[in-house]
Amino acid sequence: MIAERLAAADDHALTELFAERRLSPSANPAAGWHDFFDVAETLLHPDAVTSALSGLPRDDLAALTSGVPRRTLALTDDDGLALPSVRRALGEATIQPTPTSTPAPADPVAAGHAAERAFTTITSLADIMIAALQTPLARIGTGALGKTDRRRLVEQQVVESAEEADALVRLAAATGLMRGRDRRISTTRTGAEWVRMSTPERWATLADLLRSALPPGLRSADGGWIDPALWDGAYPRDTAWPDKARGWLEFARLAGLVADGDPPTEPAWARPAREGSAPDPEPLVALLPHEVDRVYLQNDLTAISPGPLVPTLDVRLRRMASRESHAQASTYRFTEATLSQALSAGETAQSLHAFLAELSLTGLPQPLAYLIERTADRHGLVRVSRDLSTGHTIVSSPDHDLLRTLSVDQALRPLGLVLDGALLRTRAPRDTAYWALADARYPAVVLDDDGAIVSPDRHRVADDPSPQQDYAELLERLRAAQGSDADAAWLERELESAIKERTTLIVSVDMPDGGVRELTLEPTGLGGGRLRGRDAAADVERTLPVSLISGVRRV
């Protein structure tokens, strides 16, 4: 029986099953879930069976309809054949397995377009994720990117359209580079590492993550994926699948894994990944724009990159300068605020000088060198720490006139700063006070409890999404309720169900002489290890020890 099979399965198999069938980890006795019999009843309900079949890939459905054994925990019997309820839901239709098919190679023009698209996706996605590391993106109720952020990304030339911004954020979420939670979309830890990679590494990692994220029906036996021309028919009983398939095909297109054509063609660099091998970016890199590792530093406090800047250099440069334009030639601007942010993140005047001098094709202009020195001299003029004895936040500075200015600054009024001798106090948390001062353009730093300068992280990266929900508590409860005697639990459940439904039973009773006697009973009660019921044939009330009942079946 299904309940016994579920009880005997390990936690990993049950977790996968519950996740596939979208069962809630919070199911509890109040909702009717007491043991594995309740789980089996839920899984075998006609609506649940229909839903489960709609989520099965083509090859699994083909096996069920053709009678080819394919063992599952909840849809087949011990021989791997479809249960009666499953056969009824499948009907008479026979579904053919996925045909053998290989995508046609892309021609040079289509391959060039795919390479350009992959490069655009990688750079735009990195820009979006860098922005989200500074300030998480807004997420509306549907889970999509907020309208304001879509417009901002278009205005900043990160993407060409709001639709492209939506598609890239969905791709990042599907591959685990970003994560939507509550009203925010944040870069994950995996995403933060991805941003710091080189362009070839970014593409190979994105391709690998996308392959891992593909639904089972799109995956091939060798660990790759089936011909994209077949994706549309991968889930024959899911009426919503064609739209989902188009979404996955769009992700593959954005990543440069499929090229233009009807059906889609395949660029050379996609073949190893499709066949289950490690993605090989080398053929792709040959078609990508040449990246530069030097910039022109200008007297007007800007830096001009004559081409796409190597990602590692771009990421570090954007820690100390804001990017004003984004094209083949990008412009970055240095300000006191951007340099102060870099100093707070761990840079020093010396490290800034050394990095920019090595990066520049024109040396370090005097105005920029002066701005760095002035910002470094002022950096840390306002110090934010914590009074361990009271828990209050302390704002201090050797410049007492500056402290008085802070105490009357209307922008800082929500902090409730109060003069206390040569310092200011507030009940606001330390990080809250720091960011309020930083936003008001004061040269503030944060001190930890040991007095060392630390770099506060305003918006920490999101945890990587969990591949499955946590069913540990639910499984523990189900196993505790199941007990060690599954047969006894099943019998008790059948008797209780018959009493509730007023169903007549044929009860097999083990007799003292070793024989078995069958009685036709209308059960009326169960308690104290005994079954009470009316014997219809003898027209008498009987009480039977449950321990002597070896089987029951309904009339």
Image (cartoon, rainbow, N blue to C red):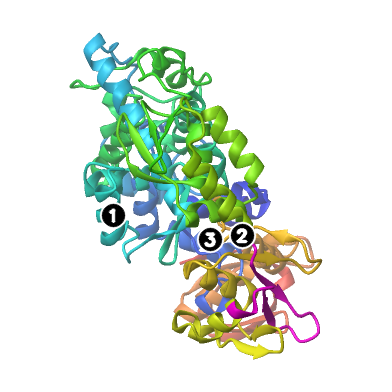
Assess disc 3: are there few (<14), some (14-19) or many (≥20) residues with their C-alpha within 10 Å of its C-alpha.
few
Seen in the picture, residue 237 relative to 103 is either above or below; the reply is below
Percent of width and height locating residue 542: 63, 83
Depth check, front residue: 424 or 309: 424
Q: CA distance from mark 1 to mark 3?
A: 19 Å
Which comes sooner in the sequence, label 1 or label 3? 1
Q: CA distance from mark 1 to mark 2?
A: 30 Å
**Residue name at image x 52 percent, y 46 percent:** 319
Q: Which residue is mark 1?
A: 152
> Dividing the picture into quarters, in which one does residue 483 lie?
bottom right
Q: Which residue is mark 2?
A: 379
Q: Which segment is the magenta one?
A: 378-401
Give the number of the disc on residue 459. 3
Residue type at tag 1 = Arg
Assess disc 2: are there few (<14), some (14-19) or many (≥20) residues with their C-alpha within 10 Å of its C-alpha.
many
Percent of width and height locating residue 20: 47, 50
Q: CA distance from mark 3 to mark 2?
A: 22 Å
Q: What kind of element bears circle 2? A: loop
> Dividing the picture into quarters, in which one does residue 476 lie?
bottom right
